[in-house]
Amino acid sequence: MITHDVRTYRSAEHLPREDQLAWKIAEVAADPVPVDADVTGMIINRVIDNAAVAAASVARRPVASARAQALCHPAKPGATVFGLDAERVSPEWAAWANGTAVRELDFHDTFLAADYSHPGDNIPPILAVAQHTGRSGADLIRGLATGYEIQVNLVRAICLHEHKIDHIAHLGPSAAAGIGTLLNLPAEVIYQAVQQALHVTTTTRQSRKGEISSWKAFAPAFAGKMAIEAVDRVMRGEGAPSPAWEGEDGFIAWLLSGPDARYHVPLPGKGEAKRAILDTYTKEHSAEYQSQALIDLARRMGPQVGDLSQVESIVIHTSHHTHNVIGTGANDPQKMDPKASRETLDHSITYIFAVALEDGGWHHEKSYAPERAGRPETVALWHKITTVEDPEWTRRYHARDPREKAFGGRVVVTLRNGRVVEDQLALADAHPDGARPFARENYVAKFLTLSDGIVGPAEQQRFLQAAEALADLGAGDLAALNFTVDPGKLGARRPGGIFDWGNK
């Protein structure tokens, strides 16, 4: 890996194109390095993982809305939409619909470092373009290896959330780079597309603050859609604001840490394999990643605590990120409201820990149901829980040594009789270094579980066979990575919008 020093340059200073971050990203994307076998295996796992959570969400309102919008944009050859059979739509709209389905339940893969990310969000846009352009499984694997590599390394180096910028600002460039690799585009084209994608996907973190709405699911799909459009424009000869990161009025100078800031971005050198996907991890539970280990800890602590009505207080000692984003340090009253949206409850570790403690586990639907959130005994327990930042857990959150890195915390339960129950867990059980690391059989089981009753048994097996044979799928065969469901499983028809006008 080569670490690149990235800073702001005044317009009067000459910054050669070859020294700009966007160009270095483009060089990585254009490098035709082979994909290692273990990386290919993990890419297949994540294709299965994305399909699993998309199947579970296929009838949910935001997903149905996105799908209805996509269907207003048919195209040939086009790309597939989760749940549908013969319909093909323009690739940017397929990315929109499928990206929303993947993101709706907050249940796919994650990478946490200087910032947050869900690198699996790269899959819908890159796959949609691959289907539309008749690419092969090997082509798709190369594109996805790049998408993961770029997003993970931007997340390692550049913190967005401290400036209240949503993490899709790293996703737009990574998806554009991955599409560039997929299509074997020259570095010049990828360079411009990466910058365009950054420029149009920089949004605020209000999408994950206060009363969180369905836009949280749409936001990564929007970034993927914008990345496809950026690549298309640049292929037609258009340019981008340059240099996007380093410019005097650019991303670093005005939206990040200012003109005196320096960022150190690691990227593979020429000929170096793209292996960043192996540093990412998926979710066993449908909740914010920083709650994964704490759900497992609640499951373990329940029998130790016993009668939960006797709890006086629960304090979760955890990292700065967990305390301030999904804990009481966020100062969001909505995170303590039993009438809050699913998206808000997903970002409330106090709610999540209370339910996991009571139920001994977590369910992607039942744990968020309004009647579940409104149980008086749950609300009483929930409101006894607070979080505090512990510098040691913050240090471990940012540790580069995998033996030190941690996303959990220490929980202290005080009972009314004065007895104290205390336990801690650093990593989720499903983490690669956890008690039960996810392997292929776990991804397959997750797909079969989440798609049960939605995708028919024969279609489940057909999809899994296609996904596991991804490396051998020929040009034009990538529609096999879609799954279809009975139309009755797609949820209620949504009200029409502008795109439906001509069909009324």
Image (tube, rainbow, N blue to C red):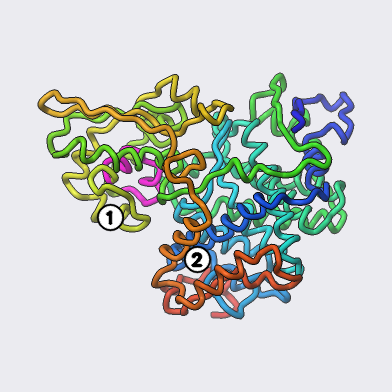
Q: Is the magenta stretch mostly helix, strand or loop?
A: helix
Span highlighted in magenta in the image: 340-355
Residue 26 vs residue 383, the one in the foreground: 26
Is residue 344 shown in magenta? yes
Classify 10 Å Cα crowding around label 2: few (below 14), some (14-19), many (20 and above).
some
Residue 406 coordinates in the image, percent (x, y)? 47, 31
Q: Position of residue 57 (x, y in %)?
A: 45, 63
Q: Is residue 115 magenta?
A: no
Answer whether labels 1 and 2 touch (C-beta < 8 Å): no
Identify the image quadrant of the N terminus.
top right
Residue 286 in percent (x, y) is at 41, 51
Inspect the image, locate mark 1, and give the three-letter code of the amino acid beneath it: Pro
User: Which SS class for mark 1?
Assistant: helix
Q: In this view, does 392 lie above or below 183?
A: above
Residue 370's label in the rendered image is 1
Q: Is residue 498 visible?
A: no
- Seen in the picture, residue 370 relative to 399 is either above or below; the reply is below
The C terminus appears in which quarter of the rendering? bottom right
In the image, residue 118 lies at what x, y percent?
A: 56, 46
Residue 430 against residue 41 in the figure, above or below: above
What is the distance, in whole Å, between disc 1 and disc 2 at their CAs?
22 Å
Q: Earlier in the sequence, mark 1 or mark 2?
A: 2
Say which residue label 2 marks. 65
